[in-house]
Image (cartoon, coloured by chain):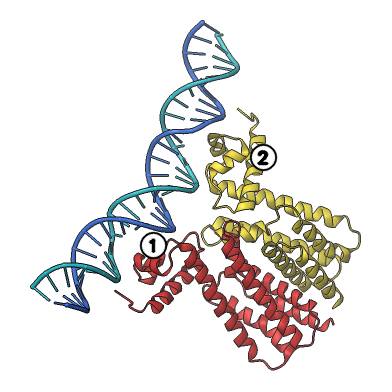
Chain colours: A yellow, B red, C cyan, D blue
Amino acid sequence: MAVTDSAAAREQALDAAEELFYGRGIQSVGMDDVRGASGLSLKRLYRLFPAKEQLVEAYLERRDVRWRGRLAAFVADREDPEERILAVFDWLEGWFGEEGFRGCAWINSYGELGATSARVTAQVRAHKREFRDYLTGLVAAAGLPDALAGQLFLLAEGAMVSAGITRSTEPAREAREAARLLLRAR
Amino acid sequence: MAVTDSAAAREQALDAAEELFYGRGIQSVGMDDVRGASGLSLKRLYRLFPAKEQLVEAYLERRDVRWRGRLAAFVADREDPEERILAVFDWLEGWFGEEGFRGCAWINSYGELGATSARVTAQVRAHKREFRDYLTGLVAAAGLPDALAGQLFLLAEGAMVSAGITRSTEPAREAREAARLLLRAR
DNA sequence: TTGACGCGAGAACGAGCGTTCTCCTACGGT
DNA sequence: ACCGTAGGAGAACGCTCGTTCTCGCGTCAA
């Protein structure tokens, strides 16, 4: 009996699942791997998450909340509305440089399961919509036209995908520079 | 004995593999599915491609040649160098609208196998490098600064990923408009 | 005609993995 | 001290799938 508290056990399971799913892909990680990495028994794991699919969903959901939270916290530190927009790309650069960065978890999940799991697809769409809406809010707060948000969104998505594939932080700087030019172009 | 010619059999195998791999993801398609869709026997399939991984590689390679060929042919129809750059996004819009469009095959493959297959990762990187180099050429031909190519590349990547996830052609138009503004911003 | 061979159809094999089951240990209440 | 029960370890089960093997048929050379 490693962990009595079921909420703590849940976090342990999700910690292990997140590290493994993000790092090696979802399909190549077995429930046995999650058991080993979490220190929980298979029995406990299945009581917390009755099937692997639900563990996957919980992983994406928790990561979504944390990811957007971290971004928003970083951006909120800047004062100027336009600076806040550029800060998004600064934050991306920091993220890209983190140990173990492997691209956007949702884009990767979509590539892996988008064709077979409607639930995962829905979560990916929801996450991207949230991110896009967040950018829309920043753009509106700066008094800039709505259409800009979509363009910034594409730059950010392109940077994420490109940084993941090439394992470099450079796309963040390129995207930031493009964003800066688009801000001026109005 | 359906097909005697081994080159034709190879094309049949690749036609089936491409349709299935692109449409349903690589891991969820079995060699048996490819057999059924291609009309070839398992024996013949394995003589052409000694393992599934090699079929996957051949699929990505043939698609790479065709994809870049189609893009280049479309773009080459325009005269003006700057129009050619924008034509890339027009072509993307047409692609996004095609029946069965499911995003970028390489981005999807990377999400699915990037963590486990070094060969696939190398092919994805090579494809993206080729595409980027192609944009660099268009930008140079228009007498525009090199840095612009990286920004256009990010817009295109963002549009591909976003169109795949949302199943919409809109990202192509957004990216085109952003590209147009970046061209003017110089 | 005959026999060797190539080929297709599909069974078979073996590994991986999601999920469940068994067994055993430890503890808590009386 | 004793019994009931919860929980962990890991075996077991069933399915999928990549890959190989078997069998039987048709073909072609001598």
Rendered-image quadrant of the C terminus of chain A: bottom right
**In the image, B185: left or right of B133?**
right
Question: What residue is pinned by disc 1?
Answer: B32
x and y, in percent, of residue A177 in the image: 83, 71
Nearer-the-camera pick, B34 or A126: B34
Give me the disc on residue A143: none
Mark 1 closeness class: few <14, some 14–19, many ≥20 residues within 10 Å: few
Label 2, label 1: how far apart the Cα atoms are? 40 Å
Question: What residue is pinned by disc 2?
Answer: A11
Give the residue displayed 71% in from the left and 61% down from the top: A167
Rendered-image quadrant of the N terminus of chain A: top right
Nearer-the-camera pick, B182 or D18: D18
Give the residue displayed 75% in from the left and 79% down from the top: B179
Q: Is residue A11 visible?
A: yes
Give the residue displayed 78% in from the left and 55% down from the top: A71
Single out the mark in the foreground, 2 or 1.
Answer: 1
x and y, in percent, of residue A50 in the image: 53, 41
Query: Which amino acid type is marked by label 2?
Result: Glu
Helix, strand or loop status at disc 2? helix
Numbered disc 2: what chain?
A
x and y, in percent, of residue B68 in the image: 60, 80
Query: Which amino acid type is marked by label 1?
Result: Asp
Q: Quadrant of residue A74?
A: bottom right
x and y, in percent, of residue D22 in the image: 25, 56
Q: Quadrant of residue B94?
A: bottom right
